[in-house]
Image (tube, rainbow, N blue to C red):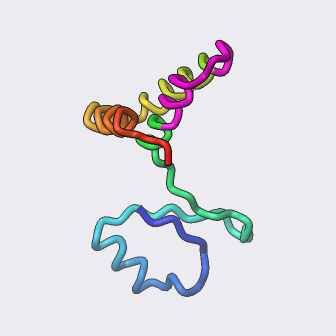
Amino acid sequence: MLIRDRDGVYGPKVIDTLDFMDIEQIVTAPRSPWQKGVPQDYVLAHLWFSLAAAQSNDPELKADAIENRDLAESKLTPAEVNEAQRLAREWKPK
């Protein structure tokens, strides 16, 4: 996936090459230079929400973390969920 703006540097040759390579393009809104493309990584989101839920002593924060973890999980394949759970198990603070 490539997140890009509408800059002229992305001419027809670049766009055709990306299409040929079957690379999905997400184009930011026109005249919006403040938009910075950031890919969403639901595996890492799942990891961090899992850690937050495990570490929280506040019932409300723990419930929020679990809710958000479950939301991230709904966007993952079973293999990705397994990867996120593995990362959470192996995570160690620096």
- State left or right for residue 57 relative to residue 77: right
Q: Nearer the viewer, residue 4 or 47?
A: 47
Q: Residue at x 48, y 24 (%)?
A: 70
Residue 68 screen position, x and y as percent: 56, 27
Identity of the residue drawn at 58% across and 85% down:
8
For the magenta stretch, what is the residue range? 48-61
User: Is residue 68 or residue 47 the one in the foreground?
Assistant: 47
Q: Is residue 90 magenta?
A: no
Q: Please give the count of numbered marks on the rendered protein.
A: 0
Residue 66 position, x and y percent, is: 53, 21
Residue 56 found in image quarter: top right
Residue toward you, 16 or 93: 93
Identify the residue at horizontal 36%, vertical 37% (top origin): 84
Magenta region's main secondary structure? helix
Task: Tell me if residue 27 comes above or below residue 71 in the rendering.
Answer: below
Q: Is residue 87 above or below residue 36?
A: above
* Residue sitting farthest toward the front: 94
Left or right of 58: which side holds 74? left
Q: Is residue 23 above or below residue 84?
A: below
Point out the residue furthest to the left here: 79
Query: Is 58 included in the stretch rendered in magenta?
Result: yes
* Residue 44 image point, x, y percent: 45, 43
The quadrant the N terminus occupies is bottom left
Q: Position of residue 11 (x, y in %)?
A: 49, 85
